[in-house]
Amino acid sequence: MLTNDHISTFQHQHILQTHTWPFHQGELQVQLKLGAYEYVNSYAPKIIRPFMPEQHREFYKSQPFLVAAARDENGKLWSTLLFASTQSPSNHRPFFVQSPDSKTLLLATTPLPGDALEGSLQVGSDLGLLGIEFATRRRNRVNGRIISNGNNDNGGKNNHQITFSVDQSFGNCPQYIKPRNRWSTRSDNTNNNNVCPEPSAPVTSTKEGRPNRLSPEQLEKVRQAETISLATGYRGHGANPVYGNDASHRGGSAGFLHVREDARTIILPDYNGNHHFNTIGNLILDSSMGITIPLYEKGEMIQLTGQATIIWDDNHELIAQHVGAKRLIQFVIDQVVELQEGSFPLRWDTSQQDQRMTLQVKRRVKESDTVASFYLSSVPGESPKLASFQAGQHLPVTIETPKGSLERSYSLSNYDPNGGEYRISVQREPMGQASTFLHDSIKVGSLIQASKPAGGFVYPSSSEDTTFIFLSAGIGVTPVLSMLHAFAADKSRKQSSALWIHSAKDSDHHPFTDEVKLLQSKVLASDDSKSMKSIVTYTREEQSIIAQDDNDENMDNDRRTIYHTGRLQETLLKDHITPALLGTKNAQAFLCGPTNFVVDMEGILINLGIDASKIQHESF
């Protein structure tokens, strides 16, 4: 039993016995130990649902593969990738997932020949699934059980179909996902997102004689991995939906996995995440774990199963060897399975020429007490023109520090569709290694490695007149600001309006005030009948600096920012949003901020009559 020195035994046991949250006791224990319990459980019951929202159902239906976590017939946990069964109808491939209702997924799939889980996905089995889009870096997780598994006749063709019943469904943040463009191999070697060829190579392992350590060739592949998937799980007594298997993604720079000399022990860094601690919480109660190392560009995969232990943050010397890690997972291999090159029916483009850019810092601007903007452009004579981006997207960057490489993604806070310049605006976090290094060490002229802008949280391209509601908190202002720039420059929506509501601590922590005023003036000076209103709330009552002209009641509301104090409440939102929605036929909302802020604001907007399908959000 894991204990927490800061919480009494009575309080600890009381929480575990009386909680109604969507976590089992292992996850709760870790949340308590690491001080995340109150924060996580302020929002988690609202976003971890016993069903799939419509957006999740559509997301899974569009995925050409899923990450899966399950146990074999001997109870060993394995992670794998699932693709469309070779026997599914060709017009459904590569998309093999259907969702007849919010509690069910139908999967026309079976593990690849030679896969460690071949023949193990049986009725009653716990199954964790992860859908992940490398291009947009979006991912959703769903956990549940297999309730049917058989061969169904579909148009005269044999269709392997798994019926999956949902216990829990929730989204994950996009951190540590390396952007990739999916493509499928063809005989003419051209890229095509709708062709799914047959596996072209045999596998190398059988269930008999599986080794318990990596070969020299496998060792090199594991040490160069940038993306892996994990399988963990805990099955307590009864049918509690918090029990089951979790499929998760881990990523980092090449070499983030450390394999010891025995070729059997792997050290996996555990970085900051959503603080749910699903993986760590499972391992507290069941040390079984599976790891899959996919080589996406070649269509091969190494699968490992074994036992894991947690190395906590009090082991400072060891953790310091893994830059950015908060704790470590030590994994000891029991069995190795390898699927050779060509086993996957899909490929992923990881071309460095297409994916990586060298950027130079041209300017630095202090936006507030804690926020600095970095203006980035191509290196003259060395780098190609910057890739274009959509308002709201983020820029994946690699930051080289004296202790090692850190991979982070920062929203682009400007709007330059021609790719002339990128601007990232970074908030200094007291314990943030990347943000601290950027603020203290990155100067004008410094070079930064980056991938192409990515993300699906974007200003819509449609020309339909729209009432936009933008809500942001803290540094969540950055993608919203980019969208406000896009709105101001949008010549196709001549009758549209934008209402931006932002929550900041106080005026010292409120960046871009002058920039927003300029955008408002630009909108009002145009020939269009557009409007842009701005509302700001300061959560610290002691703030007192509000510009006199912004409080001038004689000034047009569209030209000034209206200030309030206190946290955003439904009453305040109703007072400003309800008038904005009057007479509109098309309203869209975009939310960005801490997870609990996004969850609360989404609920309020739905109560005010905005269709849930018209609300997009991104959290951190």
Image (cartoon, grey):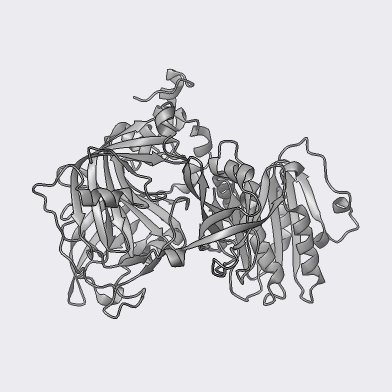
Of 431 and 21, nearer the camera is 431
Within the image, what quadrant is residue 583 found in?
bottom right
Q: Is residue 107 above or below residue 38?
A: below
Within the image, what quadrant is residue 515 found in?
bottom right
x then y, percent, for residue 156: 17, 77
Image check: 105 left or right of 514?
Answer: left
The image shows a total of numbered marks equal to 0
x then y, percent, for residue 504: 69, 45
Q: Residue at x 77, y 68 (%)?
A: 523
Q: Is residue 519 above or below residue 477?
A: below
Quadrant location of the N terminus in the rendered image: top left
Q: Residue furthest bottom?
A: 188
Image check: 261 left or right of 551?
Answer: left
x then y, percent, for residue 14: 43, 24
Image check: 16 left or right of 425?
Answer: left
Within the image, what quadrant is residue 154 found in?
bottom left
**Is residue 494 visible in the rendered structure shown here?**
yes
Q: Residue furthest left?
A: 208
**Is residue 455 visible in the rendered structure shown here?**
no
x then y, percent, for residue 131: 37, 57
Q: Residue at x 26, y 45 (%)?
A: 290
Of 330 and 603, nearer the camera is 330
Of 484 and 373, nearer the camera is 373
Q: Residue furthest front?
A: 381
Of 105 and 455, nearer the camera is 455
